[in-house]
Amino acid sequence: MGRRDEDEEGGEEEYLFKIVMIGDSAVGKSNLLSRFARDEFDLNAKATIGVEFQTQVVDIDGKEVKAQIWDTAGQERFRAVTSAYYRGAVGALIVYDISRRSTFDSVRRWLHELDTHCDTTVARMLVGNKCDLDNIREVSKEEGKALAEEEGLFFMETSALDSTNVQISFEIVIREIFKNVSRKVL
Ligand code: GDP
Ligand code: MG
């Protein structure tokens, strides 16, 4: 069964998906996004104020998909992520730092916040970032996996520093969103 395509010769269909990055301060959200969007890493933790997003074009099985990925840009420091931040999101990366247990303990709070602003169809990925810091790890991979299974999330350990699993994490979320959308269209 294929997807019905009424304008094969005409204009390309356009997909624009809003994805939000959430998680405690300094877990690496901004660096994951800059690694994904520009292949850059920033050693300095600079607190930027306000909401920012990056638009990234991704090819999913020959379809051009625009992922508009939002970064809290420091709002979370003040526990003041606004509802505007979440509005219209169809995907979310919930990030913690494998070398800081407190950030893993916050994951449920972030999931709860996501649930209060978005519906349950949002594609969710739990991301254990900074896996390059294995020598000072405080959260095992198994714990991350178990939480993800319990909450029905995709799971990846990443490193924005050495690029491990960054691309694939975003891609999995984008593919899942695409699948959800296609299901609705059919
Ligand atoms: P945010 O507050 O969640 O946006 O976190 P940032 O992206 O600003 O990163 C916070 C700090 O962690 C910065 O000093 C980064 O250089 C560092 N950092 C981010 N990702 C990684 C990573 O994968 N590995 C390591 N070792 N440090 C990272
Ligand atoms: Mg940031």
Image: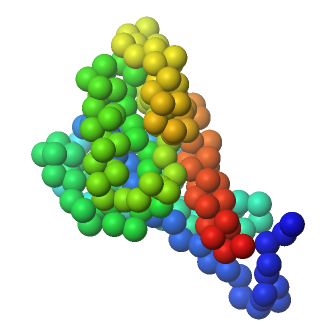
Is 5 left, or right, of 98 in this rendering?
Answer: right
Image location (x, y in percent) of residue 68: 47, 64
**Above or below, 185 relative to 105:** below
Residue 39 picture location, percent across and down: 52, 46
Q: How is the image coloured?
A: rainbow
Tally of numbered tags: 0
Residue at the (86%, 66%) spot, across then down: 1
Is the residue 12 above or below the residue 125 in the image?
below
Residue 146's place in the image compared with 136, above or below, is below
Q: Position of residue 116 (x, y in %)?
A: 29, 54
Residue 6 shows in the view: yes
x, y percent for residue 167: 59, 44
The residue under the point 28% across, 48% down is: 113
Q: Residue at x 61, y 47 (%)?
A: 172
Q: Which residue in the rendered view is the most extreme toward the top?
A: 135
Q: Nearer the viewer, residue 161 or 51?
A: 51
Which image quarter: residue 89? bottom left
